[in-house]
Image (spheres, rainbow, N blue to C red):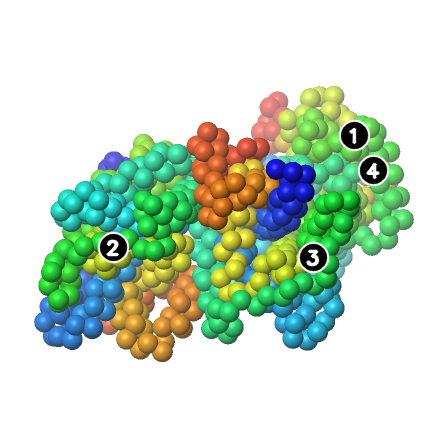
Amino acid sequence: MAKVEEQLFVKSKLIQRINMVGYLPVALFFVVLGIAPFFIKDEYLRHLLVVGLLFGAQAMVSDFTIGFINISNFGFAAFFGLGAYTTGLLVTKLGISPYIGMVAGMLMSGLLGLFTGALTMRLRGLYVSIMAWFMALALQSLTLVLVDFTRGAWGLFVPPIFDSPSVLPYYYILFLLTIIIFISIKLVLGSRVGLAFRAIGLDVDFARASGVNPTRYKMVAFILSCAFAGWLGAFYAHFIGILTPDLMGTQHTVEVIALNVIGGRGSVWGPLLAAFLVIPPFEYLKSLMEVRLIIYGLLLVLVMVLYPAGLAGIIWRIGRLLKLHQGATVWGMEDS
Amino acid sequence: MLEVKGLQSAYGDLQVLWDVSLELAEGEFVVLLGPNGAGKTTTLRTISGVLKPLGGEIKFLNKSIGGMPGHEISKLGISFITEDLNLYPKMSVKDNLLVGAYSVRDKKQISKTMDYVIHLFPRLEERLNQLAGTLSGGERKMLAIGRGLMPNPRLILVDEPSLGLSPLMTKATFGALEQLYRDGTTILLVEQHLGKALEITNRGYILEQGKIVMHAPTKELLTSDRVREVYLGM
Amino acid sequence: MDLVEIWNVLAVGLVRGGLYAQMALMLALMLGVMSIISMVNGELYMIGAYIAYFGFSVFGLNPLLAIVCSALVTFLVGAILERGPLAVMRRRAGEDWYLNTFLLTVGLSFFLKNAAMLLWKSTFRGIRWYWEGTVNIGSIGISMDRLVALGITAVTIITLQLFLRNTRLGRAIRAVSQDERGAILNGINVNNIYTLSFAIACMLGGIAGGSMLSILPASPYMGTMPNNYAWLVTMLAGLGNVGGAVVGGFIIGIVEAIAFQFFGEGWPNVISFIILIIVLVIKPSGLFGTSVKGVWER
């Protein structure tokens, strides 16, 4: 493993993906997120914060695979939705506690991730993406058609976790979830496993030659990200109270991926920030709602074509200009 | 016809050619020799436009072609028959030849040239409708050369045609090249198989580590001590 | 089930199948020649449908002319997309090419379908028929529109094949997809071929959208279904097997028509997707799979 480490740093260009701007700004960002609800008393605005955080967390989870092992989980929404429906169905049909339901949701999605991954991981990332996509389509249409079980398009009503009229407890549960996910991702990426991920993301053949078994590591990343998606989905079920099959649709996945790319692939915190910059404003300005999706598409195209490093890249650049840090090259941009 | 002066070329950060100068007059048959890794293929690639030169000059028929896109250089009349052959495996022999003639608009001309090529390589005639990917090694070489001839090029660059061929096939291939030479085609040949190459060519250049180190008529090369020692193992 | 019913199911299935086959062809062309894993196919279909709608319903054009307009506009859109965003991506080519272009097409698709939503709202723009009436042979019949749609699909697919096999440009396209360097050395301007190929591929989608207007009315999100099926059929047959994908398209169309007959709404979808997953579990490279230029294999 040490040899991989050495050679990774010799093989320039893509190194410091995570701590591009240092720990401090990211920590500050989380602190701001943590205390925001105390400054924002309006329930509607707080609701927007939750939605923003939810999408941000999803985008972050998506980044775990896109940014590091080059697998774009194109069936993301289904893993999210599976977690939601799992807890929804367990709680409504068997009456178990929502907290257990959330864990069950996480496990179910993790399992589906395991299944999907086991079938496809030996092949290129795009194959995994497409297969995940078909899993999602199959799951979505199955959910739609098995109306007696899932209530299909009529909607499955899910009891909330709290009886409180305020959104506040939900925000903090989600915040806790997000922090756990963020730290988990960082821990994994900072460990030997993470080093392997980055090696794989850089150059699979090189990684394999250095003794890293790409498949195993890709599986771990993929399964974890599916499990986290399920966890978030389960939370969502108890937050929103009603589930329909279009939760698992491709549109939802694309929104998550768009936020991921716009925020900056490989940065982990970038997508979270992007979600907060995009969602609350758009939801607030109702008139812009229709335009929101167009803007997602447009930004996704623009970022891919013109500025692949995304928002995180811009912030990194600014930081460097202001001499706030000496970051190494950013992925997607040449060092200048 | 072809003038190369001080050519420099690189693959990304790796510079391979440092100072290559050579010349071909019309109708000549010249060989470019050198050890593995010297840059012989790189030289051909740069002349043909596959690779963009880093520096130096390439002039073909008095026109500067350094940096021109490959497809335009091909249209000017330079055909590069690569070591990999770059055939179209899922297309028939006939279609491969037809694509070779892509820049020729006159159908009669194409037909005439195809007859010439088939005459040169009778084996191909039997296999006109066979997929190029299913041909034997020797047949593929023939097809590659034949395809390179379809646009009636003024200059042919050939990269190690005898590589991987049986002695019989090598003989046939060189025979074809010789025939082309006799018919007036200008040829720049890169070869490692020296014996045969030195027999049929007029002049030779020796390329070592990206620089031309020797240049003489092949008769002289054959008698040169250096060449005999290093390349012919004598 | 009597003969008439069987025939009706078959007719519906064939027409749908033709749509799937044509979309699969579009995908195959983009994948084979340009190595692009495209998610924007449905939106080209959608554009074709709207153009035909406006041409026929609003401007009163002859149906065939309306469809030709669909073809021309989508051809142009394809050329613009290729010369614009795709060319930029190509200049930046690298290991991540497949993923990056995939994401780009996802973005384009999202943008186009929502722009359409903004422009034309969600109302369905349909027509009752292009050509009125049915064609009867004995006791069985097929609506004129369906017959013509099927005919257009057949003509399109066959023309494309003939073009690729027998014309100078068609050979050039095949050459570029098989050995790009060889093509350059043979004097082919590869960039122009890319533009042409992509434009032709997009045109396939546009023709499908236009010719099926009376069967599938135009709406902003209508492209989702054709795209899903283009991919389903392609994955089922195996990437790289174009003939298989075309045949597969027709087969799936008929299978779904039968499924609808017996199980009703919603089930054809489920059945198709589950069939796909089962096939891929058993044979990941698809029914007739061959690997395409290492797209799937590492």
The residue under the point 81% across, 52% down is B104
Instruction: Place residue B132 in its image quadrant.
Output: top right
Callout 4: chain: B
Q: Neighbour class for label 1 at 10 Å: few (<14), some, many (≥20)? A: some
Cα distance, mark 1 to mark 4?
Answer: 13 Å
Specify whether disc 1 shares its chain with disc 4: yes
Q: Are marks 4 and 2 in contact (CB under 8 Å)?
A: no
Q: Residue A151 placed where, x, y %?
A: 32, 50
Q: Amino acid at mark 4?
A: Val
Question: Which residue has dot 2 on it?
Answer: A157
Q: Which mark is residue B127?
A: 1
Point out the frontmost of discs 4 and 2: 2
B68 sits to left or right of A160:
right
Q: Nearer the viewer, residue A224 or A214?
A: A224
Cα distance, mark 4 to mark 2?
Answer: 77 Å
Q: Amino acid at mark 2?
A: Phe
Callout 1: chain: B
The total of numbered circles placed on residues is 4
Q: Amino acid at mark 1?
A: Arg
The residue under the point 73% across, 62% down is C131
The residue under the point 51% across, 53% down is C225
B66 sits to left or right of C103:
right
Cα distance, mark 4 to mark 3?
Answer: 52 Å
Q: Are marks 3 and 1 in contact (CB under 8 Å)?
A: no
The secondary element bearing badge 4 is classed as: helix
Question: Which residue has dot 3 on it?
Answer: C145
Specify whether disc 3 shares its chain with disc 2: no
A180 sits to left or right of C113:
left
